[in-house]
């Protein structure tokens, strides 16, 4: 499989506090990689660096053959190749659900409104929100808003989906409906890098798991290896505490 996204030795600090310490990873087409680790381990910062919302201090990020960490790149154009979903939905409250889903297609990709809306309606039907196309986000539950955010993320046919703790702000009963959609996207062949606390989901859906600890990739392997036979003592400690 060809590599779609690669990070090479990423360093990022906020003031005197290093958050990423030489993180390297690669993501192949149609692969699902879960990034796990405790709060503060650098998971969200890593994803924000990969979609250029944060600049890196050192290292390199490649999207396909393009060095997107080059400061001369058009960040908006790069982000149009990446579908990103955050834990806080980030839907525009003044726009309808359909307008939220189609915005990037219309503004960045210059897709005609009629064509963008036709695709947007298909996507909203796919995520079970066809009836809410013309509602504003505040009329939706948290789970519905997150499904709308996922529809928006895939509307531009992104090369990679970056999912940042997308269930952490949801009530427990809503987590399943969002993870079910991500599972379906994975089964359909999406390329996904997902920071998550949902260990059972990572074990069942991911092809590989990265354990991030204090800004470093401490362990990497298949879900069976990482969850059932971790090599590092710190990984074992984290999993034991998490299960507890």
Image (cartoon, rainbow, N blue to C red):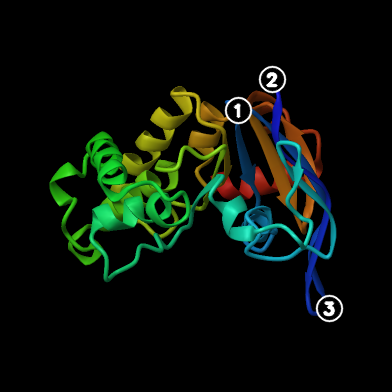
Q: Earlier in the sequence, mark 1 or mark 3?
A: 3
Exactly how many numbered labels are in the figure?
A: 3
Residues tagged 2 and 3 counted as in contact (Cβ below 8 A): no
Q: Which of the numbered marks, if any, corresponds to residue 16?
A: 3
81, 26: nearer the viewer:
81
- Disc 2 versus disc 3: nearer the observer: 2
- Image coordinates for residue 102, horizontal then vertical, percent: 34, 51
Q: How many C-alpha atoms fall within 10 Å of the one at disc 1: few (<14), some, or many (≥20)? A: many
Examine the image and state in which quarter residue 94 appears: bottom left
Alpha carbon separation for disc pair 2 and 1: 9 Å
* 240 with respect to 104 (left or right): right
The reply to whether residue 171 is in sight is no
Residues tagged 2 and 1 counted as in contact (Cβ below 8 A): yes
- Disc 1 versus disc 3: nearer the observer: 1
Callout 3: SS: loop
Q: Which residue is mark 2?
A: 1
Q: How many C-alpha atoms fall within 10 Å of the one at disc 2: few (<14), some, or many (≥20)? A: few
Alpha carbon separation for disc pair 2 and 3: 39 Å
Query: In what quadrant of the picture does the N terminus appear?
Result: top right
> Could you tell me which residue is drawn at 56 percent across and 32 percent down?
191
Alpha carbon separation for disc pair 1 and 3: 35 Å
Q: Earlier in the sequence, mark 2 or mark 3?
A: 2
- Image coordinates for residue 136, horizontal then vertical, percent: 21, 63
123, 89: nearer the viewer:
123
Examine the image and state in which quarter residue 154 appears: top left
Q: Which residue is mark 1?
A: 31
Judge whether 4 appears above or below 108 on screen: above
């Amino acid at each position: 499989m060809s590599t779609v996204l690669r990070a090479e030795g990423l360093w990022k600090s906020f003031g005197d506090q290093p958050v990423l310490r030489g993180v390297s990873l690669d993501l192949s087409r149609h692969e699902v990689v879960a990034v796990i680790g405790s709060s503060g381990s650098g998971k969200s910062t890593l994803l924000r660096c990969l979609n250029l919302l944060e600049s890196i201090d050192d290292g390199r990020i490649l999207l396909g053959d393009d060095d997107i960490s080059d400061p001369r790149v058009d960040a908006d154009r790069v982000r149009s190749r990446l579908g990103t979903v955050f834990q806080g939905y980030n839907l525009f409250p003044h726009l309808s659900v359909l307008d939220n889903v189609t915005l990037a297609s219309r503004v960045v990709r210059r897709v005609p409104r009629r064509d963008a809306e036709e695709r947007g309606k298909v996507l909203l039907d796919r995520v079970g929100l066809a009836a809410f196309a013309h509602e504003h986000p505040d009329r939706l539950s948290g789970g519905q808003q997150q499904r709308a955010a996922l529809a928006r993320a895939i509307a531009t046919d992104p090369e990679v989906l970056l999912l940042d703790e997308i269930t952490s702000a949801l009530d427990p009963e809503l987590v399943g409906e969002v993870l079910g959609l991500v599972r379906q996207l994975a089964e359909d062949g999406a390329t996904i890098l997902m920071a998550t606390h949902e260990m059972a989901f990572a074990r069942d859906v991911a092809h590989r798991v990265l354990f991030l600890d204090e800004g470093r990739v401490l362990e990497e392997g298949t879900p069976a290896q990482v969850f059932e036979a971790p090599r590092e003592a710190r990984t074992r400690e984290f999993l034991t505490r998490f299960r507890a």
